[in-house]
Image (cartoon, grey):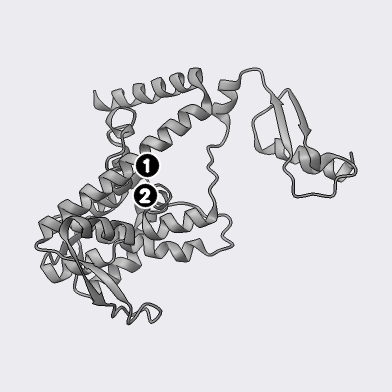
Amino acid sequence: MEKGKRAELVSFLKSVPFVEFCCVYGSTLHPNNKDKSAMVDYILGVSDPLQWHSQMLKYGVVRMRDLVQDVLNWEKIYLSGRLQKPVHILVDNLDIANTNSVNLRAALSAALLLLPSKFTQEDLFAKICSLSYMGDLRMLFAEDKNKVKKIVQGQFDLFHSMYKPFLQEYEARDFLRVSLSGTDQANISQDCGLPVTCSLVSSLPLAIRSQMGKKLGQKKIINELRNAHFAGQAINEVIIGSREEASKCMQGVLRRIVMISSARQAVSGLLAVGGINATKYLANKMQKAWKSWT
């Protein structure tokens, strides 16, 4: 094997915990192979697989098309839910950070629909953070009951910087008013009238509005949004009788989507790590969850 190729393959080991044995294989390593796009397979030998995995980074792999679809439409509220919270983007060739602005505005709209007329900024961020956990089966028995609170308090400034532009936008549109208290904790009051409620619902992703329309009814209107690309198009508008009705309906839709998505993720995760490891992992999660409830 060429020294350069060997060094490239060995560099992977710098990113994982210590291994006692490693070999690679695959057609891409064959001397006469011309298909350099084939995958290289690794076999790693470690003394304690469970301990080794506990030291390794947690990661997920997703097709970019699926990532964009969930960010824009909340089809599963899994990836979009993660990106509603602070993340550190290291590579962004398709400008997902910009696309995610649609997701953040929708998350703010959904949270406002679920909040009373007056609340604090921390209340708002906690509600945004909780959107992707509504209906999550794991929250019933395998997650810390204070998880949302800890996420928000530990990253409050990051939440503030993420949502500040959208709060300013909604304040300029008279949807809400933001005022600072003596402790620098912002107090927020919002207009809970039907016109603002309808505007907030119109900012929700298509998948959510479609499900709400099936329950509450919908009518076709001509889109007059500021985005010229969609202006003039006929769209379905959810028929809303009251804010309470819209809030309750949206919450039910979110819960159902998250419940199905979280169940799939839980099953996939347990199958991926195997029966014994899954049992140990679940027991550990439940133990931590139990401590938070007692």
- From the image, which quarter does the C terminus lie in? top left
Mark 1 lies on a secondary structure that is helix
Question: Does any portion of residue 42 appear in the rendered image?
Answer: yes
Q: Which mark is residue 261?
A: 1
Residue type for callout 2: Ile
The front one of 190 and 178 is: 190
Residue drawn 27% across the image and 60% down it = 209
Q: Is residue 115 above or below residue 143?
A: below
Residue type for callout 1: Ser
- From the image, which quarter does the N terminus lie in? top right
CB of mark 1 within 8 Å of CB of mark 2?
yes
Q: Position of residue 157 (x, y in %)?
A: 37, 55
Give the mark, 1 or 2, whose residue is nearer the N terminus.
2
Q: Position of residue 279 (x, y in %)?
A: 44, 19
Residue drawn 54% across the image and 55% down it = 64
Q: Position of residue 169 (x, y in %)?
A: 29, 72
Q: Is residue 2 left or right of 208 when viewed as pictured?
A: right
Residue drawn 22% across the image and 60% down it = 213
Q: Which mark is residue 93?
A: none
Q: Is residue 155 above or below residue 262?
A: below
Report the residue marked by disc 2: 77
Q: Is residue 86 above or below residue 26?
A: below
Q: Quadrant of residue 285?
A: top left
Kindly report the distance in space between the C-alpha atoms of the residues bearing marks 1 and 2.
8 Å
Mark 2 lies on a secondary structure that is loop
Residue drawn 74% across the image and 39% down it = 40
Q: Quadrant of residue 116?
A: bottom left
Q: Position of residue 192 (x, y in %)?
A: 12, 64
